[in-house]
Image: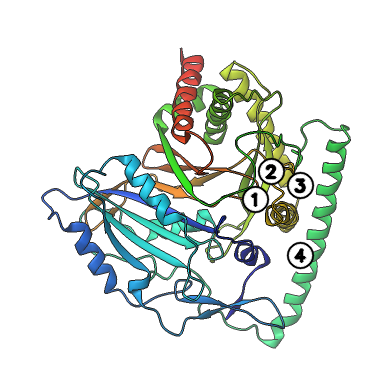
Amino acid sequence: MNKLSLLDFGFFIAETEASPKHVAGLLVFQRPAKSAPTFAKDLYREYLGHTDLKAPFDQVIAFSLTGMPQWKKAASIDLSQHVFYHRLKNASKDRQALYRFACELHVPMLDRSRPLWETHVIDGLGQGRFAIYHKIHHAYADGVTMSRWIAETLSGSPNDMGISPIWSHGHSRREGKRPKPAQEALPSLRNEMADTARRATGIGRLGAMLLLEGSKLTKNAIALPFVSSAKTLLTGQVTPGRQFAAAGISMERINRIRERTRSTVNHVALTCLDSALRRYLMDHGVDLKRPIVIQMPVNLRRDGDKAAGNKIGIVQVELSEPTDDPFVRLRNIGFSLRNVRSMMDGVAPAAIESYTILTGLVAQAAETLGLSDAMRPLSNAMVSNVPGPSGFLYIKGARMEEMHPISTLPPSNLLNVTLFSYAGTLFFGLVAADQLPDLQSLSEHVQQAFAELEACILH
C-alpha cells in the first residue's frame, strides 16, 4: 500500500455532494466507414471483458488511526458497476444534449466503497458519432495525468483494432514499489531534510513577496489571493448541478498570431478569455474596474515523472487592466505571465505546493461554513491549460474528433475553464455551477474575442 499525499487527501476530504472532486474527459468519436450501427454497443461489451485491472483503478482508500490514509487493492471489483452503456433518445442528438447528459453523469459523487472511477459509452449522437465519458476521482490523478492516461489507451492508427481500456493499461508506479534497503535509508533521510529546508525557504520567500505586494512596495510582482471582487456572477457558494459549454479555435489561426506577436498559446488564450469574461459580466450588468484574477494550476512534476497522484500547484494570475484594445490586453497578460514565471523559477516546487494547500484550506473552510457568498474568493475563476495529442487518435478505427476535460469547481468559484489542445484545435472547456446564467453565451464571446484579436494583429 502507498500513503496518499496531503494534496491527494485534500481532494478526498473536501468533497461534498454540492462540490464533488472528480475530473472527467468527454471524448467524441466518428464511427469507421461502413461500420455496424451497433459499433458503440459492441465496444461496451468488449470493455466488459477486460477484467484485469491495474493501479490505481483497482484501489480504494483505507483509513488509519495512526497516520495518513493509504491506497489498498479492492477485495473484488464488478466491472458492471464501473462501465456503462447509454443511448440518447432520437430527439436528443444535438451537441447540447450530449453536454447536458455528460453533466448529469458528472454531478453525483463516486461511490467510496468501490474504486473511484467510471466509464460511460454514450451512443446515438447522430451522423455516426458516439462518445466516451471517463470519470476519475481527483485523488487518483491531476488533469494533465488523466489526459495522458486517456491518450495512452488510444491508437495513432485507424488500422489498429485492439483496445486497451484505461483501467487495464497500467499507468502508475504504485504497484511493485519496493521498500528502501537499509543502506538507502540515510541518504533518503538527508534528501527529506533538504526538501523540508527548501520548502521552508520557499514559503518564506513567497510570504515576503505577498507582503511587499500587499503593502504596495512592489507592483504586479505576484498576484494576491483573496482580493478579487466578491460581487460577481462568477463567484459564491458552490451548489449542486453542473453545465458545460465549449469553444474551439484552430491552432493554425492561433499560431499566426503567436508568430506575429512572439507570444505563447497561453497568452493568446487568456487574452480571449479575459475579453470574453468581461463581456459576459457586462451582459449581466457587472462592469469590473480592476483586472480579473484567475487561479492557474501549474505542473510541478519533474521530467519523466509518470506516477499517479497530484503534482500541481495553484497560483493566482492577474489578467489585463480594463481595455478595449486587444493588442494592449495581449501585452498586459504577457507581462503578468512573465511575472508568474519569474516567481515560480525563484521558489521551490514544494513551497508552491504548500502555498496551494494553505490558501486552499482557507477557501475550503469558507465553503464548508457556507461563507463563500460573503467572503472574498481566491480568484474570479479557475483556468488550466492541459496539452493534448497533436494528431488524431483512434479506437478500433473510430477517430476521436474532440476531447473535452470536465473538471471540478474549486471553493467559491462557479466557473472552471480548461484549455485543451488536440489535433490542431484549442478547445475552451467551460464547466460551471447551474446558477451561472447563459453559459453558452460565454463560449460565443470567446470566439468573438479571438476574431477581434485576429483582426487587430493580422489586418
Query: Residues under labels 4 and 1: Cα distance?
Result: 29 Å
Label 2 residue SS: loop
Find residue 11 and report its horizontal and vertical position in percent. Answer: 61, 62
Q: Is residue 221 left or right of residue 143?
A: right
- The one nearer the camera, 401 or 116, is 116
Find residue 293 and report its horizontal and vertical position in percent. Answer: 67, 36
Residue type at tag 3: Gly
Residue type at tag 1: Pro
At 69% from the left and 28% from the top, the residue drawn is 291
| Dot placed on the residue nearer the N-terminal end, 1 or 3 | 3
Q: Is residue 100 left or right of residue 345?
A: left
Q: Where is mark 3, residue-wise? A: 346
| Dot placed on the residue nearer the N-terminal end, 2 or 4 | 4
Q: Is residue 443 left or right of residue 195?
A: left
Q: Where is mark 4, residue-wise? A: 195
Q: Are marks 1 and 2 in contact (CB under 8 Å)?
A: no
In the rendered view, would you say 309 is above or below 202?
below
Task: Please rate how many residues cluster around mark 3, counting C-alpha atoms within 10 Å: few if below 14, some from 14 to 19, many from 20.
Answer: few
Q: Is residue 117 visible?
A: yes
